[in-house]
Image (spheres, helix red, strand yellow):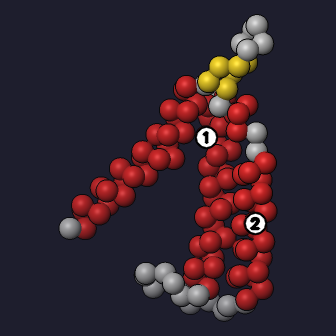
Amino acid sequence: MANIMILSSLSRFIQFLVVPLSVIVFYFNLNKEEVLSAPKNFATDVIIPVAAFIFSLFLVIKFDWVSQFSIVSTDGTSVLNIAAIVAVAISQIILPVVLLIWKNTRKA
């Protein structure tokens, strides 16, 4: 259960950083594919996402990563939570890279 909570919190941090950047990309038409046409507003499409990105980045920096990836044993010492580190590496790094490679090889 602890590993699921760690993955969930890390995924939220990533979402809170990626979504504002995506909104800004769509506002400036920097996307590669055509998207739905919608009315644009500089305040809601650039200013608020920039503020959200800065606040989320601040939360990522201030987050207690050590306690997320360690386990306190009965004698009070902290040891690395290898299962949590492996789960994060697989779900946030390895799996996305494998899926990107798979997607690119299917196009070719």
Q: Pick the quarter of the image with the N terminus.
A: top right
Residue 66, image quadrant: top right
Residue 70 x %, y %: 67, 26
10 Å crowding of disc 1: few (<14), some (14-19), many (20+): some
10 Å crowding of disc 2: few (<14), some (14-19), many (20+): some
Q: Is residue 12 in view from this perspective?
A: yes
Against 75, residue 27 (above or below) is below
Q: Residue furthest left?
A: 108
Residue 79 x %, y %: 65, 19
Q: Which residue is drawn at 25% across and 68% down?
A: 107
Q: Which amino acid does label 1 sit on?
A: Leu
Name the residue that disc number 2 marks: 54
Q: Residue at x 76, y 45 (%)?
A: 63
Against 10, residue 46 (above or below) is below
Of residues 29 and 65, which is closer to you in this image?
A: 65
Residue 58, image quadrant: bottom right
Q: Is residue 5 in view from this perspective?
A: no
Against 2, residue 26 (above or below) is below
Q: Residue at x 42, y 46 (%)?
A: 95
Q: Which residue lies furthest to the top in this view?
A: 75
Q: Are marks 2 and 1 in contact (CB under 8 Å)?
A: no
Q: Is mark 1 on a helix, strand or loop?
A: helix
Residue 33 x %, y %: 43, 81
Q: Could you tell me how far apart the alpha carbons at marks 2 and 1 are, in whole angstroms?
A: 22 Å
47 relative position to 18: left or right: right
Sequence order check, earlier mark of 2 and 1: 1
Q: What element carries label 2?
A: helix
58 relative position to 5: left or right: right
Q: What residue type is labelled 2?
A: Ile
Name the residue that disc number 1 marks: 7
Residue 40, image quadrant: bottom right
Residue 26 x %, y %: 57, 82
